[in-house]
Amino acid sequence: MSNIKFGTDGWRAVVGKDFNEENVALVARAVGKYVFDNYGIYKKIIIGYDPRNMADVFSMQFAQILKDIGFNVLYSDKVIPTPVLAYNAKLLNACAVMFTASHNPPEYLGIKFIPDYAGPATKEITDEIVSNLGCKISTYVQGKIIETDFLNNYIARIEEIIDFEKIRKANIRILFDGLYSSSIGYFDKLLSKHDIKFDSIHMYHDPNFGGGMPEPKPQYMQESIDYIKNHKGYVAFANDGDADRFGVINENGEYVTPNEILAILLMHLKNNKGFAGSFVKTVAGSLMLDIVSDKLGVKLIETPVGFKHVGEAMRKYNPIIAGEESGGLSIQGHIPEKDGILANLLILEAMAYFGKSLAQLQKDLKDFVGCEFINTRIDKKLDNFDEVKPTIEKFSLMNKIAGMSVIKKDEKDGVKLYLEDNRTWILVRPSGTEPLLRIYVETDVQEKIENVKSLLN
């Protein structure tokens, strides 16, 4: 039981080791007690799972325990993306439980609790769930499990947001890299329903994700890159295992960073679709986003790293768009949870509205900002957790780095140091799960990156 810890996005562990029947039962009863204590026995609970090994088996075990407690459980009749389940939680005023380990290696599985506001559970909620571990709960109500298809509710919502006719008329050459993920049967179905042509690869669910990782990054989208290089003018789209993150390759076979996508979509939603409000990013997001927000006259709100913080800010500020540098975003009026399917469709919509290739939109963005930013992340291992705080404090006391003065410090998540060139910053934050510091560096010249990195080794 001591091995069950809810991190930034739920509890994750290796199947057959800590992720076993006994621990899943403990979490099921803990979640059941949380829902009973806060909402009552008649609160609906919906459950879904991604393509991972044993996800269907463990999710059904979880559903059976909640049914025996007395809850009515709506159980997905097939593999489902996290954003689809989250949207249905909002629509049906239900709490949701998703079995996924997102982009973690294939041997992992996880449990993510999504309250009825349809975003990541806050620390207060997960702390209460963890405090319930080992508790007994019983009621005198008989529950039931109802197998449910959640797809059509989600399709109806996305059709309210996206101009599919505009995309269809744009005749964009689309490659959908299913990447063996849960977006198969959802993203492609939305395109097909609206007669939008696309090519596709990796269109089946594989618990081993083709021997790679369920992460839409260049190293795992190499076949998409090769396809584009052999088929002129295509843009490739993919999602991670539970489809809350997105990955995009442009017409030149180049990976488009989430920071660029966020900036392009902010301009699209404000200029083309008339959205009004603020913009939410994390403290690790690019300075480019600050510049774009300022030039568009959009208020910028910055949160600690992690979509649970972004989701909280979405519920508070109702921004035009909110996202993080790791490839998750959502928009005003949707859900305060990452939606990689919506993200990919918004990119297609932006291309259609602007009437430009994605590569050209990237060039326009660079011209709009006035410079190009380079990002890197270094993971610095420490001997133990006791070293984390002193090491961060050491960085916090620095007044000069790589020959440049520190002009501003931000401590909302670790410490972020802004340097005097107004183009370079360094963020040092703890990983939270191991004695490790995550060090983010951004600047406008590769030489500066190397200078900073040499000081961190």
Image: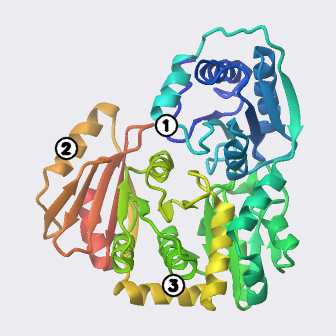
Write down the quadrant of residue 54 in the picture.
top right
Rendered location of residue 20, percent (x, y): 71, 25
Q: Secondary structure at mark 1?
A: loop
Side (left or right) of 212 relative to 422: right
What is the C-alpha distance between the residues marked 3 and 2?
38 Å
In the rendered structure, which disc, 3 or 1, sits on the residue that comes first in sequence?
1
Is 321 rendered above or below residue 132?
Answer: below
Residue at the spot 76% in from the left edge and 55% down from the top edge: 154
Side (left or right) of 322 relative to 212: left
Q: Secondary structure at mark 3?
A: helix
In the rendered structure, which disc, 3 or 2, sits on the residue that comes first in sequence?
3
In the rendered structure, which disc, 1 or 2, sits on the residue that comes first in sequence?
1
Rendered location of residue 221, percent (x, y): 67, 69
Rendered location of residue 439, percent (x, y): 34, 55
What is the C-alpha distance between the residues marked 1 and 2?
26 Å
Q: Which residue is mark 3?
A: 362
Residue 252 visible, this angle: no
Question: Contact (CB < 8 A) between labels 3 and 1?
Answer: no
Residue at the spot 69% in from the left edge and 36% down from the top edge: 94
Q: Which residue is mark 2?
A: 393
Q: Residues within 10 Å of mark 1 (few under 14, many from 20)?
A: some
Q: Which residue is mark 1?
A: 122
